[in-house]
Amino acid sequence: MTEQTTEAVAEELHDVRLTVNGASYDVRVPARRLLSDALRHDIGLTGTHVGCEHGVCGACTILLDGAPTRSCLLLTVSADGREVTTVEGLTERDGSLGPVQQAFKDCHGLQCGFCTPGFLTTITAGLRDNPDPSEAEARDMIGGNLCRCTGYANIVAAVLRAAELGAEAEPA
């Protein structure tokens, strides 16, 4: 019988600089580290949820340079030097709820809340691009996000309410 030794193979780490919710972060991550994992485990922002790990459900959606992006499909090294906005970055500077968050509260747009961060980031970008959506456009806006608890009616109502709140906040 021969003696076998097992050596742990050290995975090469990569230095990545991210701007997350306006703050700069330098992280050392393995090449295979997903952005969703880096946000949660390396940076400590746990608002981004991982649902399906296949980019299908939308729970992990963040804004990457302003565009809705599935963080469970993106390697952290691919986000080097980029601007990331998570659900934690959607609050107002004074800590109050942002318009999309307030609309979700007003319209009871969440139940268990697991999918909510992905909806909030997706809708934030959608309303930036289309600040006055019709109901059909609101439904289309959230088409890539899944919720197992609701029938989507309250979420669509929240999109329309967030558009109203955004219009009210604009200077005349």
Image: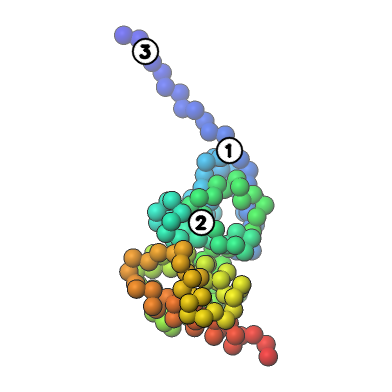
Label 2: state its secondary structure.
Answer: strand
In the depicted view, which residue is nearer to us: 164 or 7?
164
- Who comes first in sequence, dot 3 or dot 2? 3
- Residue with the mark numbered 2: 70
10 Å crowding of disc 3: few (<14), some (14-19), many (20+): few
Residue for point 40% across, 56% down: 51
Residue 123: mark in rendering: none
Extreme residue toward the top, this view? 1
Label 1: state its secondary structure.
Answer: strand
Q: Is disc 2 in contact with disc 1, using a CB cutoff of under 8 Å?
A: no
Rounded to the nearest whole Å, what is the CA distance between mark 3 and mark 2? 46 Å
Q: Amino acid at mark 2?
A: Arg
- Residue with the mark numbered 1: 13
- Who comes first in sequence, dot 2 or dot 1? 1
Instruction: Decide if residue 75 is on the left or right side of residue 82.
Output: left
Label 3: state its secondary structure.
Answer: loop
Residue 3: mark in rendering: 3
In the depicted view, which residue is nearer to us: 47 or 122?
122
- Who comes first in sequence, dot 1 or dot 3? 3
- In this rendering, the answer to whether 133 lies above or below 48 is below
The quarter in which the C terminus is drawn is bottom right
Residue for point 51% across, 54% down: 71
Residue for point 46% across, 63% down: 144
Residue 6 falls in image quadrant:
top left
